[in-house]
Image (spheres, rainbow, N blue to C red):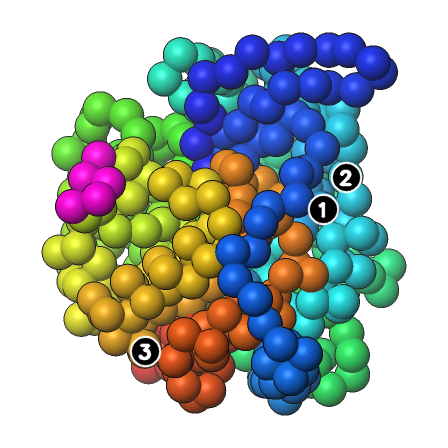
Amino acid sequence: MAIFSRRNILLGGGAIGATVLGGGYLLTRKKVVPIGFDLSANELAEARALLDANPAFDAHAHPGRTFVKGATGLAPKLKLYQALGTFEGKAIADMKAGGMAAAAFASVSDFQVLNLGDHGLAARRAFEPGEAWASYQRQMTNLNTLASDGLVRALYHPNDLEAAHKAGETGAWFTAEGGDFLEGKPERVHRAFSDGMRAITIMHYRTNELGDIMTAAPVHGGLTSAGENVVHAMNDMGMVVDTAHASEDTVRGILKTSRAPVLCSHTHIMGDKMPIMPRFISADLARDIAAEGGLIGLWPGGLGITTLSGLVDRAFELIDLLGPDHVCLGTDMDANYKPVMETYRKTPWLVGGLLKRGLGKEDTIKLMGGNLLRLWHDAIAQGSAS
């Protein structure tokens, strides 16, 4: 989920009017975003053929915003967001139409305690006793219901993606954005795994027991001992550790602790054009993640870009910095800030844009899903070796 920017909420005409964004909260109808480049019919057909033959896999997303369902104790502005409801059926139809074979279906661990302030999203209160764990259970029940109802096929192992793709089913990789529900208890990692979760973004917008976030002043000075224990437990279970939203010191602690390569699922690199962005990471940190075999997720958040063409530019910036083996796609779909890829129906256009700019087919396949599958395999291998 992306960051809130400071906006007003306007109600009028029976609909929520202005934009309030943060953690990807968009209190208005989606706007169609310009693509910014042209593709011929043959180029678009080539992109669709690549997606038909090679399953695309989104490392971070909230398709249909399942995480809002049944949430209680919300701040007034987030109640307005919740009132927009969920739309998993439409999101999955968009995935099928766009050739997106699978995506993370992410819960949001700190959703209930967040609020919008002058400087973005932040925790407005502490969890009540047992509230974080109850929220996790509610959200996992809702996610698993998508599978039991036949809307998606849950992905428990990388091989499940190929099976789902061949069967024409949409793959759902159950993840958590924020490790708040763990409450620093590594044994809950085992419970989450048994519930079907396969990745955890250990930080979100609340500084929790595991470490510090990148959008607030540090409290712990990096990864805590509880955080180390959680990372070890995730390694043991073969779960993917996601470092998005964590402070640089926390990420470096994760890199030092984890036996498996890590994911930073949705971000970009600070540079000369945009040196200060609260959700971007340094080039040095990105290189260090890649040096350990990890991945940086190409993020279509509208910070400094306004078209899909800008996202293609950023793909090449990441590849130039890290190489084609260390970039994946992390759209933050349906919970993003001014997304320049606002629907999965534009997936063929993203692929076509990459190919048109000169990215080879093999490297495009890596970015669109192959690298993430490899990372997941690596995480499982480290767990098996423990």
- Asked whether, in this view, residue 32 is left or right of residue 175, the answer is right
SS label for mark 1: helix
Q: Which residues are magenta?
A: 272-276
Quadrant position of the C terminus in the picture = bottom left
Q: Earlier in the sequence, mark 3 or mark 2?
A: 2
Mark 2 residue element: loop
Q: Position of residue 230 (x, y in %)?
A: 35, 51
| Quarter of the figure with residue 5 | top left
Tag of residue 86? 2
Q: Is residue 152 visible?
A: yes
Question: Looking at this view, is 120 or 76 the one in front?
Answer: 120
User: What label does residue 325 carry, if any?
Assistant: 3
**Residue 24 belongs to the span the image colors magenta:** no
Where in the figure is residue 260, as x and y percent of width and height? 30, 70
Q: Amino acid at mark 2?
A: Thr
Q: What is the distance, in whole Å, between disc 3 and disc 2 at their CAs?
A: 35 Å
Q: Secondary structure at mark 3?
A: helix
- In front: 289, or 300? 300
Residue 267 sits above or below residue 59 on the image: above
| Helix, strand or loop for the magenta stretch, by majority | loop
Say which residue appears at 52% left-offset and 56% top-offset.
36
Label 2 Cα neighbours within 10 Å, binned few <14 / some 14-19 / many ≥20? some
Q: Which callout, 1 or 3, points at the residue further toward the start of the chain?
A: 1
Given the image, on which type of amino acid does mark 3 rest?
Asp
Disc 1 to disc 3, C-alpha distance: 30 Å
Task: Identify residue for label 1.
Answer: 64
Q: Which numbered mark, 3 or 2, is in the foreground of this view? A: 3
